[in-house]
Amino acid sequence: MPASALAPHQLRLTIDPATLGFASTAELQDLPLPWIGQERAQAAAQFGLGLHQPDYHLFVLGEVGSGRASLLRQAMQTAAAERAVPPDLCYLHNFDTPDRPRALRLPAGQGRQLRQGMADMAKNLQADIPKRLAAADFKAEAERIEKTWQAQEGEAFAVLDAFAEARQFRLTREGGQMVFTLTGPKGQALTEAEARALPRERRAEIDAAEHELRTEIARFLEAVRPLERTRDDALAALRRQTIKPLVEHALHDIRQGLRKQIKDTVKLTHWLDQVEQAVLGDIDLFEPLDAERGGDQGADAEDDRKDALDDLLARCQVNLVVDNHGRTAAPVVVEDNPTQRTLFGSIEHGSDADTVQADHTGIHAGSLLKAHGGFILLHLHDLAAEEGLWQRLRRFLRCGRLQIEEGGGGPGHAPGGAVALQPEPVDVDVKIVLIGSVDEYYALQDADPDAARRFRVKVDFSDHFAATPATHHATAILVAQVCKKRGLPHFGPDAVALLLEQTHREADDQRRQSARFAHTEALAIESAALCKARGGPLVQAADVQAALAARTQRHNQPEEELHDSITEGERLISLAGSITGQINAMTQIDLGDYRFGFPVRITARTFAGQEGLLNIEREVDMSGPIHDKGVLILHSYLTALFSHVAPLALNASIVFEQEYSGVEGDSASCAELYALLSSLSGLPLRQGIAVTGALNQHGEVLPVGGINEKIEGWFRACSTAGLDGTHGVLIPARNQRHLMLDRGVLDAVERGLFHVYTMGHVSEGIALLTGEASGMSPAELLQAQADELADRATAVEDTVMQRAELTLRAYRRACQVAGGARRGRGGGRQVGGPRV
């Protein structure tokens, strides 16, 4: 069967705008956006998000631009609406172990209430306690206690003073110290010189008396000290008795405000009791020092008092690290910058002079704590970017408990040698949605199976999906919502039809659409920008065409340079006539953000010999494994094709001319076979027809990738030289459904200036290229095997197969003659069969 030419309507899917059912996308902008073509992923996501069980986290597979993140965020919001609002999380000072702050969970909104209540209490106590201590009743009672002590102390001092006077000493108190002075006969104080002038016996008596006095002073102090303690205890008890109602009333209001039953009720009650004891234990700190002390010393003492009071009140503060006040559903957190601090939380350190300090008020929650009770979305690539982050997340997944650590370096590490805080760990119930590529998913399965089994819900986004009227309509809704969200002019049906055709083009399939909707959104934005520039009210198909052309213009500089090299004669590409052993193949160049096709010349040479088939690219390490595989398949097919001509005596070489950057892929194996057969048969090949296609060991032609770019690259080269009706391409028949060719190609086909031929078997292509019957089809080969010709060398040379066979037989005879000549010289040995 000869190669068949395709009609223009077979070269591209064309969508009729009238079938879309709307006059403008404005009619669709309020419709809900479905999961276009991702029903499998949608069902998996709904299952995983709705299953409230450990280890059923979600791993989302898909390529960038497939809408995986936005669709999962939408699904997470829907699932979160069905869950209860999680509690607040507070950290409190631990009065028993200050370096281990206590965690406290409260119903949503009550964390803020507790924090404000404690702040109000601190403010009110600072104002109310000094006023209460300055009240008349308190002062009267304090004076009574003081007078009682003074009376008792005065009696004891009078006895001591009499004791000193009896021994000729005058006793006074200066600044809390006992001072005694020796007196003379008339009661006057003696100077030091006068005391030394006394007789020795008198000085000895004075020394003995002084010793007695010191002993008696010690007894006095021992007797007075309990009195002082009694006075201080009485004053302290008075203060506590006076202030306690204030503190109890403030704390009672706080307790009453937290009416809901909470799991941590006992913990909160115990902490509030400790707050009360701490305040009552340091009431003096609330009372400013007497201004009468004056001077720098008094100012320093007052500053110390204020600092101590600030420290006390700081211990009574509530650090609300997770505030769910005002929420109506469970949280949905999207962490775009996961680090140790942002994901797991951190502890902020303050500095006081040369000391680095941290307390419970410096604790900050990370995204995992904020997502408690709900969902968090992460990207695996981001987690792998910071050393140790994935390992820590693995530990969290294993135990479900999270402890905020100092500086992300683990517990027990604090800057500047400060004592490290170890906040109380808390249980975290969160559903993790992890986004990654297919390669990352299977790499995780292989390298870390323990972590991988925590993500038991696989949400697999397809790169493309079967196109239906429903998916076309859903894509139109996507365009409408893009316009609404970004304030763009809406699209007419003809523009949407062209956008839909572009999704088929990106999928390289007339029956399927690409799932990379980010590309569709970008094209919609660019088309709308051109519509705005011309002042149009509605985006038309011409705007989309212009946007595509502008996008190509921004990216196709390398393509322009390569085609210029053909026009300028730097690259040798024959576009007309027929040449033996030479053919034009089609390649695709992928730059990442832009793909284009480009022709390449393949040449083959054959000789008599024993070396077999030589792939020059492979010999110089310029070919990839897939290309090498294609050449080996080609060799296998060629050997089977001429298996009746055995042994083969062939030297053959194949080369991609002027290709210096390496070759990969097997899509040129058909072209390589045709070049070899042309060289063997002596039949020239048409240079106006470029070939692409891979073959299997039975000569069947397999589909190849990048078919549209390859055809358009060859079409451009031919158009530059001038189309005359002899130009075209030969492609696998199985690629027909993948054709979404540019309309310029369709116009040329309609006018008969360019042709697209398809083949299912390599025999069909060689017949088109040579104009001769191939003799290679399965039916023809079976017939040839059935023919019992006595001498096949006498067969009529009417097929490519027969001509090539005659050449191979001639090669074998030449090798036999050369072998016989070597044996005649005594130095040769016949080699049995080809190497290839």
Image: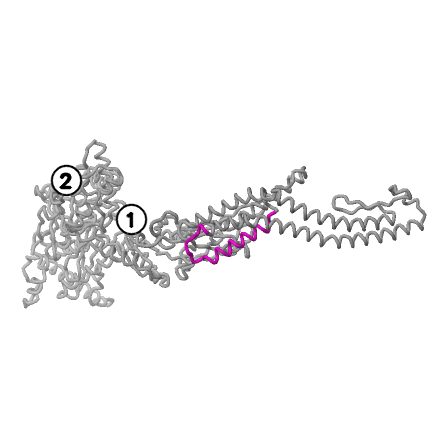
Q: Amino acid at mark 1?
A: Ser
Residue 46 position in % (x across, y down): 27, 56
Quadrant (top left/top right/bottom left/bottom right) for the C terminus: bottom left
Task: Check disc 2 and report the residue beneath it.
Answer: 23
Pick the front one: 667 or 376: 376
Q: Secondary structure at mark 2?
A: loop
| Membership of 191 in magenta stretch | no
Spatial CA distance of label 1 from label 2 is: 28 Å
Q: Secondary structure at mark 1?
A: helix
Please tell me the numbered disc located at residue 70.
1
User: What is the magenta range?
Assistant: 256-283
Q: Give the tally of numbered discs.
A: 2
- Measuring 35% from the left and 63% from the top, which residue is drawn there? 449
Residue 466 position in % (x across, y down): 17, 53
Q: Is residue 560 above or below residue 471?
A: above
Magenta span dominant secondary structure: helix
